[in-house]
Image: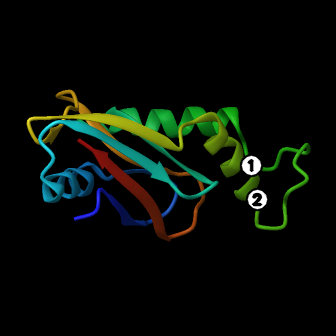
Amino acid sequence: MSPVMSLECRVSGKGLHEITASVSAAVARLGIAEGLCTLYIAHTSASLLIQENADPSVQRDLERWLDRLVPEGDALYTHTSEGPDDMPAHIKAALTATSQAIPIVGGRLALGTWQGIYLWEHRRHRGTRRVVLHVGG
């Protein structure tokens, strides 16, 4: 099996969408005992994040904070043809991460007890985002 695959991640709109289970299952299918899992989101208005997955208020607070930092409707935006949430989404993706690297130890992602992997959708649209996964062992 190739160490590179794409995960098609359905999103129901703006916010943090946990993808830990999908990534963990893909790593398990590859059967790599020790190595590195690199994730990359192939979009310019979404990002990837490793964050606490025990208390949902963490995700809500992160979303509210970033919305306050990069609001819709700023008069400085000139890229407005794709809707009022598009340019703020590009800025949010630029300020956050489009890739993550996670060690694989004992055939499993070496995430901490309270860590999860999130696709952070910065637009209001529903649909599918593509995350490219590469595992090296």
Which residue is label 2 attached to?
A: 84
SS at circle 2: loop
Location of residue 46 in the rendering, given as x and y in whole percent from the top left corner = 56, 52
Residue at image point 76% right, 59% down: 84
Residue at image point 42% right, 38% down: 100
Q: Residue furthest top?
A: 112
Q: Nearer the viewer, residue 84 or 116?
A: 116
Q: Are marks 2 and 1 in contact (CB under 8 Å)?
A: yes
Q: Nearer the viewer, residue 69 or 132?
A: 132
Q: In this rendering, would 27 be left or right of 121?
A: left
Q: Is residue 66 above or below residue 21?
A: above
Question: Quarter of the image containing the C terminus?
Answer: top left
Location of residue 75 in the rendering, given as x and y in whole percent from the top left corner = 91, 45
Q: Nearer the viewer, residue 131 or 9?
A: 131
Residue at image point 22% right, 32% down: 111
Q: Amino acid at mark 2?
A: Pro
Location of residue 41 in the rendering, given as x and y in whole percent from the top left corner = 49, 53
Location of residue 51 in the rendering, given as x and y in whole percent from the top left corner = 35, 33
Task: Tell me which label, 2 or 1, sits earlier in the chain.
Answer: 1
Q: Is residue 108 above or below residue 24?
A: above
